[in-house]
Image (cartoon, grey):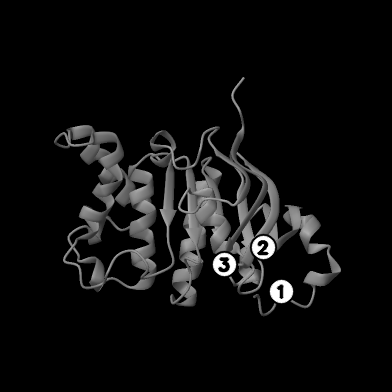
């Protein structure tokens, strides 16, 4: 029987020095879920993502990604990561959209030359996110929304099964935000598992189906509709966190 749990955190705690950031976090993400991570600034959302991706090591507890340790080479190629805008690709780097998306094939191709199938997967990914006309553009010349789409395309080119996004809408306008969410909805409809952080709580809850609310501890984990019924949320939807 195939294990439908893609990501599992069991009693996970982590801190920087003597300062705890997250404590005793336990939840799991099943295949096909669109999970929103919410909470105030400093609540540990980005830290939980980095722990889940194996970029940080928990002080206590266990994390499993696709049934393995998250830092395993076998699972990294199955995860597409879209970081906060500007945190990964320097705008001054002379790298094109197509080159960035092609990086998604590296875990599969390794050091061998790209084959026709690799290039077709890159082209399919560019078409899927609607930026095939930008393939020769430098990443530094793109708008914020276009850059995020290019990073999503990189994940698709890698045939990622889990898409993780850390505040992808920061610094992009309302139209680009709406367009990005339309893309994520479409990917989710096609079966992609998505974990997303966004401070715009009102927009986020319109799209996700599960919520994890953090404030150092896990304050809520469950379906979006149950989250919306929580009285503590009513005054927060307009402004987010």
**Disc 3 or 2, which lies upstream in sequence?**
3
Horizontal and vertical percent for residue 114? 17, 37
- What's the CA distance linking mark 1 and mark 3? 12 Å
Residue 198 is tagged as 3
Q: Which mark is residue 147?
A: none
**Between 25 and 91, which is closer to the camera in this rendering?**
25
Give the class, few, some or many, for how many residues have Cα within 10 Å of label 1's Cα (few <14, many ≥20).
some
Dot 1: what SS? loop
Q: How far apart are labels 3 and 2 at the CA level?
A: 10 Å
Check disc 2 and report its element: helix, strand or loop. loop
Q: Which residue position holds label 1?
A: 237
Q: Residue furthest front?
A: 18
Q: Which residue is mark 2?
A: 205
Decide if residue 3 is in sight here.
Answer: yes
Residue at the location (44% across, 70% down)?
Answer: 176
| In the depicted structure, whether residue 70 falls above or below residue 222 | above
What distance separates the C-alpha of mark 2 from that of mark 1? 9 Å
Q: Position of residue 216 (x, y in %)?
A: 68, 64
- Relative depth, front residue between 142 and 40: 40
**Mark 3 near mark 2, Cβ–Cβ under 8 Å?**
no
Q: Are marks 2 and 1 in contact (CB under 8 Å)?
A: yes
194 relative to 157 in the view: left or right: right
Residue under the point 42% across and 62% down: 83
Q: Quadrant of the C terminus?
A: bottom right
């Amino acid at each position: 029987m195939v294990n439908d749990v893609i990501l599992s955190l069991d009693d996970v705690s982590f801190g920087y020095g003597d300062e705890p950031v997250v404590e005793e976090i336990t939840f799991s993400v099943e295949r096909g879920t669109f999970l929103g991570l919410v909470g105030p600034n400093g609540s540990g959302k980005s830290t939980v993502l980095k722990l889940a991706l194996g970029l940080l090591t928990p002080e206590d507890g266990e994390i499993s990604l696709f049934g393995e340790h998250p830092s395993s080479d076998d699972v990294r190629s199955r995860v597409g990561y879209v970081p906060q805008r500007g945190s990964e690709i320097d705008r001054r780097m002379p790298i094109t959209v197509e080159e960035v998306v092609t990086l998604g094939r590296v875990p599969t191709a390794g050091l061998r030359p790209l084959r026709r199938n690799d290039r077709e997967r890159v082209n399919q990914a560019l078409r899927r996110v609607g930026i095939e006309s930008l393939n020769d553009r430098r990443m530094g010349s793109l708008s914020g929304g276009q850059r995020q789409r290019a990073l999503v395309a990189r994940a698709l080119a890698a045939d990622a099964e889990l898409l993780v996004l850390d505040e992808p809408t920061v610094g992009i306008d309302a139209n680009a935000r709406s367009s990005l969410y339309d893309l994520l909805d479409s990917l989710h409809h096609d079966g992609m598992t998505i974990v997303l952080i966004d401070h715009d709580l009102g927009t986020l809850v319109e799209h996700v189906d599960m919520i994890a609310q953090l404030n150092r501890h896990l304050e809520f984990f469950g379906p979006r509709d149950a989250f919306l019924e929580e009285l503590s949320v009513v005054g927060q939807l307009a402004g987010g966190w």
